Image (spheres, rainbow, N blue to C red):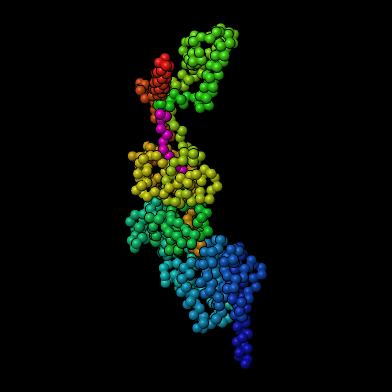
């Protein structure tokens, strides 16, 4: 009986020592965290830890982990009797949660002994979720001392799952034996650990080719990845000593995430956890944000369109475009008003003659076209009206002649599509190789964005080539941060001259990498990307990759697409007087119709008169 009592007292003492140890570790390492999750099973075996001075959230199976994670938990203190439940719920709970943090800490309190302790350690070690956890600390009770264990994490399985001793804690003296750091940064040297990354061939971001730089593998073969994002992925593994296994879905490219929780392409692979990370000129889209963790900003990306170049105004329109529609209407109203006034003035002072209203119309018309005409000067009203008309027509006529001369010297072009509003008004089809090019505008309430979305189309690659060769529809292109244009190979030296780049971007985004919500190395990637960005290395890489993999002629042509060709002096041809010929033709046609009607009328009148005489 005394032995049982002594054993019970020792157990209580060891439990108290373990609680004090965990409290000491929490105070030392977790003061900066948002909140700590205490995962317990509410049984007699649960260890009571005095953590009142730290932000604490209690988790047990009846409550679940989802709500606790959304409260900002980045450190977890877990009891032995619930650790397997925690590991099973770890990924589903994080996938549901909105709160994201890459660096998490885990303390598991092992207070069993002998075979039970061995079984618990083996179950933890064999659990697949351990690959998603880097900062794991096992507090294993060994009588009056405690072993502080962790798994290696680095390297490949099964080496990455091996336990290693960090330190020992003497419960009697309340001291650490070795005094080592209990949460070493294992990401500094990953010893060749393999991560999976989703991407696809996308110039100048991801360019895959066979070659061995010791970083990439694809279909069990060594690969090299160039490009802006390829450089980041390469430097990540060179810095932290890891390898990337490529997951490529060139057909679906970015892919989609559907309402039922499934997906395809790059997003689908990440959603199904076939990969740990994804890159490829991707912005932070609202529709995909709830499923993934996003890296910090990498660089600016703009999206605009290559639109058909405006052509020359048709020659037959030249005589009309001198004045706007409102000016032509005003001139017509003045012509009719003056003619009516002169007719009224004439009819009130001079007896009826054969010079009727049509004669007045022709006189006024001759004045408008600056041709000499008999000026009616019978009354003061006529003289005043004609004087004002002459002054007006001289001004208008000379303005018209001057504008005609300038148009013939510098041919006018149709209105260009330069802004987003112009693109919406034009109503032309907007083409892109994937629907992801419009993800940023999906939820826009702007009417012009809605119009562009309505005209948006994703043709097949074969059809895309035919469309761009036609030069009648808009093609979406990317604007790189340092001035270059991201275009597909369907824009080439043969058809690039058909297009002009818009002066206004359709929208812009900031590129980010996508990761699962539990990938523990996202902070390491953010740190490296920030260093590369701040050192302006991406500017150099952009120049290098554009020079290697993109058409220099196409880049220069797009940059100078707003330049107009020089207007050389030339003789006037028939096309340039097509407007005047059209007026003459219309006048002759109308006169012919009137002449025929007059003949019919006179013939009918003659026949009617003859029939009356016979009666």
**Residue 413 visible in the current orientation:** yes
**Total count of labels:** 0
Q: Along the line of sight, which residue is nearer the eye, 100 or 2?
A: 100
Look at the picture and state if 29 lies above or below 426: below
| Residue found at x 55% / y 8% | 351
Query: Which residue sits furthest top?
Result: 378
Q: Along the line of sight, which residue is nearer the eye, 506 or 217?
A: 506
- Measured as percent of width and height from the top left, residue 596 is found at 39, 21
Q: Along the line of sight, which residue is nearer the eye, 95 or 549?
A: 95
| Residue found at x 59% / y 66% | 67
| Residue found at x 47% / y 59% | 258
Q: Which residues are magenta?
A: 302-314
Is 310 in the magenta?
yes
Query: Which residue sits furthest right?
Result: 52
| Residue found at x 40% / y 45% | 487
- Measured as percent of width and height from the top left, residue 544 is found at 39, 46
């Amino acid at each position: 009986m005394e032995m049982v009592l002594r054993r019970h007292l020792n157990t209580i003492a060891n439990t108290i020592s373990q609680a004090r140890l965990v409290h000491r570790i929490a105070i030392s390492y977790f003061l900066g965290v948002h909140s700590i999750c205490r995962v317990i099973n509410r049984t007699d075996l649960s260890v009571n830890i005095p953590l009142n001075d730290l932000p604490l959230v209690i988790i047990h199976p009846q409550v679940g982990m989802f709500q606790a994670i959304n409260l900002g938990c980045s450190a977890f203190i877990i009891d032995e009797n619930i650790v397997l439940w925690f590991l099973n719920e770890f990924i589903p709970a994080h996938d549901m949660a909105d709160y994201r943090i890459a660096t998490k800490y885990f303390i598991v309190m092992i207070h069993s002994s002998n075979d039970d302790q061995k079984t618990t350690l083996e179950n933890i070690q064999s659990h697949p979720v351990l690959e998603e956890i880097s900062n794991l600390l096992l507090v294993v009770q060994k009588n009056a001392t405690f072993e502080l264990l962790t798994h290696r994490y680095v390297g490949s399985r099964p080496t990455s799952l091996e336990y290693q001793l960090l330190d020992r804690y003497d419960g009697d003296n309340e001291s650490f034996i070795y005094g080592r750091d209990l949460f070493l940064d294992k990401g500094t040297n990953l010893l060749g650990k393999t991560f999976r990354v989703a991407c696809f061939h996308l110039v100048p971001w991801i360019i895959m080719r066979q070659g061995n730089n010791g970083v990439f593998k694809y279909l069990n073969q060594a690969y090299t990845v160039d490009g802006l994002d390829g450089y980041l992925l390469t430097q990540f593994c060179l810095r932290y000593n890891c390898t990337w296994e490529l997951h490529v879905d060139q057909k679906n490219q970015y892919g989609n995430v559907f309402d039922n929780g499934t997906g395809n392409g790059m997003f689908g692979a990440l959603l199904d956890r076939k990969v740990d990370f994804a890159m490829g000129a991707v912005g932070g889209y609202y529709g995909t944000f709830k499923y993934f963790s996003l890296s910090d900003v990498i660089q600016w990306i703009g999206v605009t369109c290559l639109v058909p170049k405006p052509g020359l105004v048709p020659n037959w329109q030249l005589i009309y475009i001198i004045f706007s529609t409102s000016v032509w209407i005003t001139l017509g109203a003045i012509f009719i008003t003056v003619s009516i006034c002169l007719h009224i003035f004439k009819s009130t002072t001079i007896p009826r003659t054969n010079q009727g209203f049509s004669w007045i119309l022709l006189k006024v018309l001759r004045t408008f076209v600056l041709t000499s005409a008999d000026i009616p000067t019978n009354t003061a009203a006529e003289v005043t009206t004609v004087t004002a008309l002459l002054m007006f027509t001289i001004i208008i006529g000379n303005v018209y002649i001057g504008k005609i001369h300038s148009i013939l010297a510098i041919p006018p072009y149709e209105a260009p599509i330069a802004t987003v509003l112009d693109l919406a008004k034009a109503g032309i089809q907007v083409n892109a190789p994937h629907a992801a090019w419009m993800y940023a505008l999906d939820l826009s309430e702007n009417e012009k964005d809605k119009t562009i979305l309505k005209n948006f189309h994703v043709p097949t690659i074969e059809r895309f080539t035919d469309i761009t060769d036609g030069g009648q529809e808009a093609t979406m292109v990317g604007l790189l941060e340092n001035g270059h244009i991201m275009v597909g190979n369907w824009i080439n030296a043969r058809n690039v001259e058909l297009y002009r780049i818009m002066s206004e971007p359709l929208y812009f985004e900031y590129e980010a990498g996508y990761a699962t919500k539990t990938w523990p190395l996202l902070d390491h990637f953010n740190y490296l990307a920030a260093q590369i960005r701040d050192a302006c290395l991406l500017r150099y890489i952009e120049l290098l990759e554009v020079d290697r993999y993109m058409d220099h002629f196409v880049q220069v042509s797009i940059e100078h697409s707003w330049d107009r060709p020089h207007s050389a002096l030339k003789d006037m041809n028939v096309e340039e007087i097509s407007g005047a010929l059209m007026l003459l033709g219309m006048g002759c046609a109308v006169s012919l119709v009137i002449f025929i009607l007059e003949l019919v009328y006179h013939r009918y009148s003659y026949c009617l008169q003859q029939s009356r005489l016979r009666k």
